[in-house]
Amino acid sequence: MKDLSIVIPSWNTREVTLAGLAELEREVGPGGGSGLEAEVWLVDNGSRDGTPAAVRARFPWVRVVALPRNLGFAAGINTGLRRIEGRHALLLNSDARVLPGALRACVEFLDRHPDVGAVGPRLLHPDGSPQRSVHPLPGLAGEVLPRALLEWVLPSRFASERGGDAARDVQALRGAALFVRAAVLREVGLLPEEYFLFLEETEWCRRIGLAGWRIVHLPEARVVHLLGASSKRKHPGLTRIEYHRSLYRYFRDTRSRWSGAAVWALRFARSIFYVSSQAPLALAGGRHGARWRAHRDVLAWHLRGCPASVGLSAIEGERLG
């Protein structure tokens, strides 16, 4: 049995995907330096930029699954997870760059701690600054109180990225680079496909924790994450809409109906406040203007009753994965 199975989803990010695989090749490709027996699955979600052909030509050791269209991030990942042969699996974004030693560190940690079901590395921005790697399960407290205050008052629940280099238990990990024990897949199941994008790994971590497995952040393992190469930069408004859609689903499926309604009302009120108070940014160019327009799109979506027909999943020929 292989030590590690790596599943990478892609969507119209050919150059980003090729660059990431070039980095990964040094670790697990032919003659790779990690020493792990690994396999890599690339699941392409209906890209129109020639990603599958380019990967097959440049990296013949990568197993490619080319889907005619994509039903969402979770469905794409699950397509790969159903094929893996490893003791452990790594869900890896196409815009993530695994730094030397990270793969072995996480695999060895799982091997040494049989009660740990999932491990996440420290995520970094390209400039080396820390990126959010862990997060608590969504709740009303997180919607109404500042994150810094919650980290100070309830550090066991609201874990901070400033927790040093020691491994620690957390509630949920970011899905940009997420190691999972194969036994967890058999017991808990695959990612929830009803989430098209966002919070699918959060709901998964919730179920993993409920099944009695520990979820651990391992800062000594490091991964650079370019953040949003395939969706946020191309469709910022629709990306925000998908996040809100997933958030409302999460509360509806895991919390009470009244708490879900409260979150909807809070988010709707915030959209109104931001769009009205920051209206002058509509005339600005660059990042500020783009952010205002994204919030405007979210507000318009709320005013229309949060229709399912609006979002990344509705973009013809550009199904995200």
Image: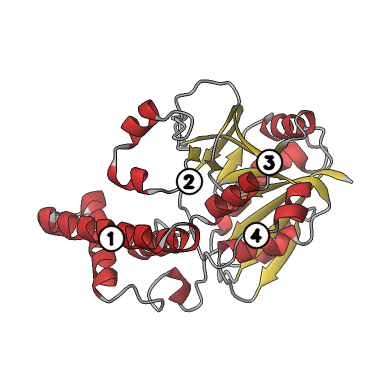
Q: Residue furthest right?
A: 1
Q: Quadrant of residue 244?
A: bottom left
Q: Residues within 10 Å of mark 1 (few under 14, many from 20)?
A: many
Disc 4 on helix, strand or loop? helix
Task: Please name the amino acid that badge 4 sits on.
Answer: Ile
Q: What residue is disc 1 on?
A: 294
Upstream in sequence: badge 1 or badge 2: 2
Mark 4–mark 1 distance (CA, rounded to whole Å)? 27 Å
Whole-percent x and y of residue 250? 47, 59
Task: Please name the amino acid that badge 3 sits on.
Answer: Trp
Q: Residues within 10 Å of mark 2 (few under 14, many from 20)?
A: some
Disc 2 on helix, strand or loop? loop
Mark 3–mark 4 distance (CA, rounded to whole Å)? 21 Å
Upstream in sequence: badge 4 or badge 1: 4
Disc 3 on helix, strand or loop? loop
Q: What residue is disc 3 on?
A: 213
Q: What residue is disc 4 on?
A: 77
Disc 1 on helix, strand or loop? helix
Question: Can you say which quadrant of the picture contains the C terminus?
Answer: bottom right
Mark 1–mark 2 distance (CA, rounded to whole Å)? 25 Å
94 and 310: which is toward the camera: 310
Q: Quadrant of residue 107?
A: top right
Q: What residue is disc 2 on?
A: 137
* Rendering colour mode: secondary structure
Whole-percent x and y of residue 45? 60, 68
> Is any atom of residue 58 visible in this view?
no
Task: Please name the amino acid that badge 2 sits on.
Answer: Leu
Residue at the spot 45% in from the left edge and 60% down from the top edge = 231
Q: Nearer the viewer, mark 1 or mark 2?
A: 2
On screen, residue 39 versus residue 271, left or right, reads right
> Is any atom of residue 149 visible in this view?
yes
